[in-house]
Image: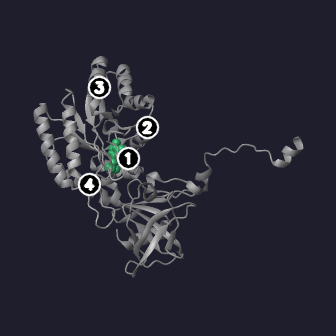
Amino acid sequence: MNQKDLLKIAADFGSPVYVYDSQVIENQYKRLTGAFKKIKQLKIHYAVKALSNISILKLIKNQGAGLDTVSIQEVQLGLAAGFKPEDIIFTPNGVALEEIESVAKMGIQINIDSLTFLEAFGTRNKNIPVCIRINPHVMAGGNSNISVGHIDSKFGISIHQIPHILRIVKNTGMKINGIHMHTGSDILDIDVFLYASEILFETAKNFDNLEFIDFGSGFKVPYKEGDIETNIEEFGEKLTERFNTFCKNYGREITLSFEPGKFLVSEAGQFLVKVNSIKQTTSTVFAQVDSGFNHLIRPMLYGAQHEILNISNPEGNERFYTVVGYICETDTFANNRRISEIKEGDILSFKNAGAYCFSMASNYNSRYRPAEVLWMDGKAHLIRKRETFEDITRNQIEVNIPSKKVLAEAI
Ligand SMILES: Cc1ncc(COP(=O)(O)O)c(C=O)c1O
């Protein structure tokens, strides 16, 4: 997919629009499985939350992956996309026990991350095997909002509470078939992963009936020029060696699982917006576009830096622009970025817009959520229509509000 194709997509489907390249998703999947080719039983569960369009889920299913879900609605989406229950895992946090039980009864592998729920679930459903999410107390992740394995985090059961877990397991007679961790997103240093893995291996030795160990995800992808990504090949080699040694000592082969979101879909996505106006103030040149943090919140939420290209004028002289949206509060996509000269009406492309972009979009300011297009086999396929005014009002119920005049008459 080249810049001409992108301009045609913006012309045909309008802006703003998300575009995903199927080939990039397939390549990333092959890269990840290739890095772990010496693991006998490998399972990749794609983290649906990153990008949950059903066509994307189907594409990922074709690669041989399963799904990692965090809500019963994501489970339903997965089933609607054709995944079998046994290919889906459920890794929620803070949801009601009833939701966990409903999902477990659908035949889906559940992951429990609290002692009280472990005990309650085990007491009522001792024949349903459970995976336990451990908090290894490792500080990792590119931003405090996505560092989820440290001591103050709400996720997982502390490694210091293993004795409690073992008492609950013994008392209830429940079966533990998996151990899980996810320490955060955007981890750069593979030594952090390996350190946390050692903690997981130590924990796993306490359980005799394991079928898998799930190492979560958090692989870093490059967002801007000069960014370094997780060296997946080196990580694959090092973890494979450790995992195979673990299996030997454990006495049998078990499955190694990951649940990547960003690694599979981030680089596949581009977000195309149109420039509404160029506004020079005393200190800044603003490029104001036909979107805002309602459509792509990562820069405002995480300080994420998405590379921005002017695909209408890619060879133009570079100038400094602050790219902003149309939301009625601070809504900055990029500060003082060098971008080739922008004119009103130009189309800008935000790179790395596959993960946590559309899936976090909202109707704030009563704007429509954008269309989504999948680029596959050299053709653009619309996979989600742009919303319309009907979508904004669909679930609203108008009550009869007496006008002031009627009220006055009643007094
Ligand atoms: C439990 C769990 N697994 C997997 C992921 C996917 O992480 P990433 O998109 O960094 O690969 C997340 C992300 O928040 C998560 O919370």
Residue lying at 17% horizontally and 46% vertically, measured from the top left: 239
Q: Mark 4 vs ligand 1: CB under 8 Å?
A: no
Secondary structure state at the residue bearing disc 2:
helix
**Counting other residues with Cα less than 10 Å from the Cα at mark 2, is it few (<14), some (14-19), or many (20 or more)?**
some
Quadrant in the rendering for residue 358: bottom left
Circle nearer the N terminus (2, 4): 2
**Counting other residues with Cα less than 10 Å from the Cα at mark 1, is it few (<14), some (14-19), or many (20 or more)?**
many
Q: Amino acid at mark 1?
A: Val
Residue 160 appears anywhere in the view: yes
Are discs 2 and 1 less than 8 Å apart at CB? Answer: no
Which residue has dot 2 on it? 72
Secondary structure state at the residue bearing disc 4:
loop
Which residue has dot 4 on it? 188
Residue lying at 33% horizontally and 65% vertically, measured from the top left: 224
Circle nearer the N terminus (4, 3): 3
Are discs 2 and 3 less than 8 Å apart at CB? Answer: no
Residue lying at 21% horizontally and 51% vertically, measured from the top left: 190
Q: Amino acid at mark 4?
A: Leu
For marks 2 and 3, give the CA distance: 25 Å
* Residue 380 appears left or right of 251: right
Circle nearer the N terminus (1, 3): 1
For marks 4 and 3, give the CA distance: 31 Å
For marks 1 and 4, give the CA distance: 22 Å
Q: Which circle marks residue 48 in the picture?
A: 1
For marks 1 and 3, give the CA distance: 29 Å
Single out the mark in the foreground, 2 or 3.
Answer: 3
Are discs 4 and 3 less than 8 Å apart at CB? Answer: no
